[in-house]
Each structure stands twice: as structure tokens, then as C-alpha cells.
Amino acid sequence: MLLKGKKALITGASRGIGKEIARRFIEEGAEVWGLATKSSETARELATFATEKGTEYHEIIANIGDPATIQPIISEALKASGGFDVLVNNAGITKDGLSFRMKLEDWESVLRINLTGTFLVTQVVSGDMIRKRAGSIINLSSIVGLHGQGGQVNYAASKAGLIGYTKALAKETAGRGVRVNAIAPGFIVTEMTGAVSEEAQKAWLETIPMKKAGTVTDVANAAVYLASDLSEYVTAQVLGVDGGMGA
Ligand code: NAP
């Protein structure tokens, strides 16, 4: 078990990639706190699974895009848990549209949740990790943050921002035992990509050297590696999980 004895906070754990990261972390022995905006059946499923695996799952309800409430909620979870060894900033949204007619609200909400939300959660958790001189922070970026994508200027800016944020924070914390890395998934089958038109999905598939979409487990396995001591000399990196798309 690669994560036995570790405590992990995962944002956006109610579905998609975050749910699978939570499931794989539990499978590897971690105790997991999963955050989402509302209570879900997933939380009950993960709690049952955790009990079977001899560990625990805790649900946190919060909106990472609300600066007034998110930090007090994370501070409370931090106290209740005794501190996190791993933080996975996975929660994210899309509000797609062409740049010239994008509403300011759609630009701002994507930046607020994907980038500022990550900053706010991490600020609380990393302070404690630095005091303890140990921790692994994993930010979910995207291939779109590296290469761009028409119709997603807000999302691409937020995900590119996360890469700069990852590298800068990694440099601040490397000497204090805290590692910070990003995962840049390519085309992964989830509800988020299900919202993309069939035509766009086909066009994406053609650009993947491996000629297939990735699974949530492909991404979760990369998160297990970055959370575990197997990656103890790895920081400030962007790990592509993209079937060769980012090369
Ligand atoms: P998803 O299925 O849409 O799930 C998003 C998760 O984020 C949900 O658990 C959702 O919780 C949570 N969330 C959204 N807004 C939130 C907020 N304001 N506060 C707290 N939680 C919030 O997304 P996904 O496809 O699994 O993607 C997960 C991450 O990977 C995202 O950061 C995404 O950008 C990135 N990514 C995905 C792909 C892909 O192909 N799917 C590719 C590259 C990168 P609720 O249930 O409460 O709404």
C-alpha cells in the first residue's frame, strides 16, 4: 500500500477524476477528506469502501470559489484531521465560449474557482505542511493550459496559471520539505468532457498519438505516484497524462 498512514484532502471528489483519485487513495491505504459543493451519493459510496479497506472517508461541503467561507472551512478540517500529508487541488469548472463574446462573469468565475480557489485552499494547508516540513501538493492543470484550445480562453488561462503557480510555490517550499507538482491530463472521459460536442470529441481523438481517450484511473494513478514517497525527489513538475498529445 503506497499511501498507508497518509491523510489526504481532495477537492472536487464527488465525481469524475476527483472521485477516482479518492477511490485509488483509499485503495492504497490513505484516510481521505473529499470536498464538493454539495453532499453526494459518492461520499456514502467512498465511506463504505474506506471501511472495507480499514480506513476512513470524510465529506467536506464547501465552495472553493467563495473567499469568505473557504478558508475557515479548510482550517476546521485541518484541525479535525490533525493535518494533511497530501493535498489534491482537483475541483474545476468550464464555461466555454468564444473570447469575443465571453461574458465577464464567465471569465471571472472560471478564474475564481480554478485558480483563486486553489490558491485559497493551498494557503491554509501548505502553511501547516511547511511547519511540519512534509507534504505533497498536486494541482490538476490540463493540456489546454499548455497548448490552448479555441473556445476556452478562460479555462486555458486558469490552467496555464496553475502551472506557473505550481512552479513558483514549489520553489518557495522545496527547502521546507513540501513538494508541489501538477498533472496535465489530455482527453479523459468524464462528465466535463461529455459536455463537449461529439464533433469536437472526434477532432480531439485524432490528435492523440495513442488514438484513444484516457480514463480517470490513468489520472488517479499519476496522483498516487505524486502523493507517495516514490516521487520524493520530484517537485515543480508537470506530468502529462495524455496519450502523447502534449509532446
Ligand atoms: P467534473 O466531472 O466536472 O467534476 C468537477 C468536480 O469539481 C466536482 O466534484 C465538483 O463538485 C467540483 N467543483 C466544481 N466547482 C466547485 C467549487 N466551486 N467548489 C468545490 N468543488 C467544486 O470534472 P473532471 O472532468 O473530473 O475534472 C477534474 C479536474 O481535472 C478539473 O480541474 C479539470 O479541469 C481537470 N481536467 C479534466 C480533464 C478531462 O478530460 N476530464 C482534462 C484535463 C484536466 P460538485 O459535484 O459539488 O459540483
Image (tube, helix red, strand yellow):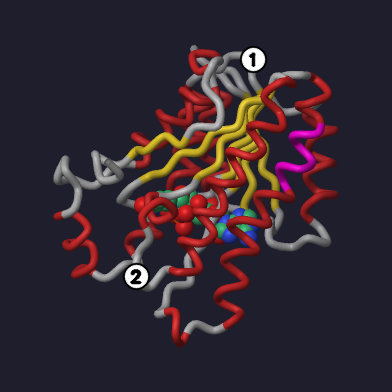
Residue 37 visible in the shown view: no
Q: Quadrant of the C terminus?
A: top left
Please tell me whether mark 2 sits on a helix, a strand or a loop.
Answer: loop
Instruction: Identify the residue at horizontal 50%, vertical 45% (top origin).
Output: 140
108 sits to left or right of 204: right
Residue 240 included in the magenta stretch of the image: no
Residue type at mark 2 is Gly
Q: Is residue 119 above or below residue 133?
A: below
* Point 70% across, 46% down: residue: 60
For image coordinates 59% across by 81% down, the residue present is 104
Residue indicated by mark 1: 5
Magenta span main SS: helix
Answer with mark 1 or mark 2, whichever residue precedes in sequence. 1
**Kind of element beneath mark 1:** loop
Q: What x and y, as percent, mark residue 112?
A: 65, 64
Mark 1 near mark 2, Cβ–Cβ under 8 Å?
A: no
Q: Which residues are magenta?
A: 121-127
Q: Is residue 128 above or below residue 134?
A: below
Of the pair 92 and 28, the residue shown nearer to us: 92
Task: Decide: is 244 above or below 69.
Answer: above
Viewer-nearest residue: 11 or 156: 156
Q: In the rendered image, which residue does mark 2 sit on?
A: 150
Q: Name the image quarter holding residue 62.
A: bottom right
Residue drawn at x 61%, y 46% is 165
Task: Provide residue 133's location: percent of width, then percent of height.
Answer: 76, 19
Eye-nearest disc, 1 or 2: 2
**Label 1, label 2: how far apart the Cα atoms are:** 43 Å
Q: Is residue 83 visible?
A: yes
Q: In the rendered image of this protein, does residue 131 appear above or below residue 94? A: above
Q: Amino acid at mark 1?
A: Gly
x and y, in percent, of residue 101 in the image: 46, 87
28 or 124: nearer the viewer: 124
